[in-house]
Image: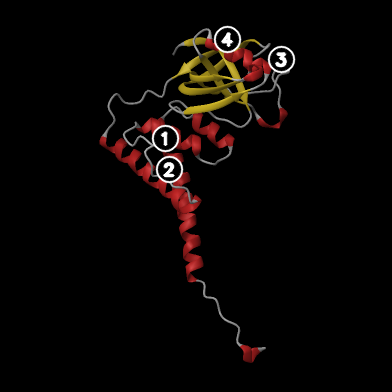
């Protein structure tokens, strides 16, 4: 477990996962400075979820969860007025140890966490990956009406990559996504994500069966 110092970017509505790409538009002055500083050094930023309810920490700043994800700026675009568009690539989960600086942006000591995937994925893991992708595509195609069967998805990606990508895209509460991020084992994350996708597909299928079983009875003019 490595310990590093990391600039922290807290947001109220984003949970960032390892192996996932995250586009961000940076407009606040303090975070424009954070990106500028990161580009001059390791290009690393720690994304972490703000707690709901307006809670504050001991320094009077908005409270955050303890587990976040470190990302590296893979691409960036400088915009007028010092703004940025950046693309973060998720690297490692981390556990927040303490903040060492608060202004203009927060900097923290963090412990990097590893999911420690198998060096070589088993046949069972590959089948689980393929099944999740199949059901996930079906959910988007049949329930949301969005065609996800295109070449943007790497079907040879590892189980960890697929699970984290699906977790990031699913329209579930950010608190639920935070719980997924905090799970140390990819297999546990898979079980939850698979359950969500299957549950929504099964619910949609039941609704279709109910609608199909309904019969519209035409008005009988003799009863009027």
> Of tags 1 and 2, which is closer to the observer?
1
Q: Which mark is residue 37?
A: 4
Query: Residue 146, how many percent across, how many down?
Result: 47, 48
Question: Height in image: 169 above or below 184?
Answer: below
Crowdedness near tag 2: few (<14), some (14–19) or many (≥20) residues, C-alpha within 10 Å: many
Provide residue 60's location: percent of width, then percent of height: 73, 18
Q: Is residue 98 visible?
A: no
Q: Which of pointers 2 and 4 lies earlier in the amino acid sequence? A: 4
How many residues crowd mark 1 within 10 Å: few (<14), some (14–19), many (20+)? many
Q: Quadrant of the C terminus?
A: bottom right
Residue density around tag 3, few if under 14, some if 14–19, many if 20 or more, within 10 Å: few
The residues bearing labels 1 and 3 have C-alpha atoms spaced at a distance of 36 Å
Is 121 rendered above or below residue 224? above
Nearer-N-terminus badge (1/3): 3
In the picture, the quarter occupied by the N terminus is top left
Residue 59's disc is 3
Q: Whole-Å distance between the Cαs marked 1 and 2?
A: 9 Å
- Inter-mark Cα distance, 1 to 4: 32 Å
Disc 1 designates what residue? 163
| Distance (Cα) linking label 3 and label 2 | 39 Å
- The residue shown at (47%, 30%) is 183
Earlier-in-chain disc, 3 versus 4? 4
Residue pictured at 45% horizontal, 28% vertical: 20
Q: Secondary structure at mark 4?
A: helix
Is 210 positioned to the left or the right of 133 in the image?
right
- In the structure shown, which secondary structural element does the residue marked by tag 2 occupy? helix
Whichever of labels 1 and 2 marks the residue nearer the N terminus, that label is 1
Find residue 54 and report its horizontal and vertical position in percent: 72, 28
Q: Which residue is label 2 attached to?
A: 194
Res 94 label: none
Q: Secondary structure at mark 3?
A: loop
């Amino acid at each position: 477990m490595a310990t590093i110092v990391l600039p922290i970017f807290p947001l109220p509505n984003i949970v960032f996962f390892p192996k996932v790409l995250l586009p961000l538009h940076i407009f606040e002055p303090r975070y424009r400075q954070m990106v500028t500083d990161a580009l001059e050094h390791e290009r690393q930023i720690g994304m972490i979820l703000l707690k709901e309810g307006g809670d504050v920490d001991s320094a009077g700043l908005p409270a955050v969860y303890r587990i976040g994800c470190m990302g590296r700026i893979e691409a960036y675009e400088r915009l007028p007025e010092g703004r940025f568009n950046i693309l973060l690539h998720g690297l490692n989960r981390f556990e927040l140890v303490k903040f060492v600086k608060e202004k203009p942006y927060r900097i923290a000591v963090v412990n990097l966490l590893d999911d420690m995937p198998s060096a070589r994925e088993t046949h069972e893991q590959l089948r689980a990956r393929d099944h999740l992708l199949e059901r996930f595509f079906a959910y988007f195609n049949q329930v949301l009406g969005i065609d996800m069967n295109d070449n943007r998805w790497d079907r040879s990606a590892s189980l960890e990559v697929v699970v984290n990508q699906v977790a990031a895209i699913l329209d579930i509460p950010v608190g639920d996504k935070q719980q997924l991020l905090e799970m140390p084992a990819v297999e546990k994350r898979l079980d939850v994500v698979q359950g969500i996708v299957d549950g929504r597909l099964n619910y949609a299928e039941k609704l279709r069966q109910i609608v199909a079983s309904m019969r519209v009875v035409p008005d009988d003019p003799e009863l009027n």
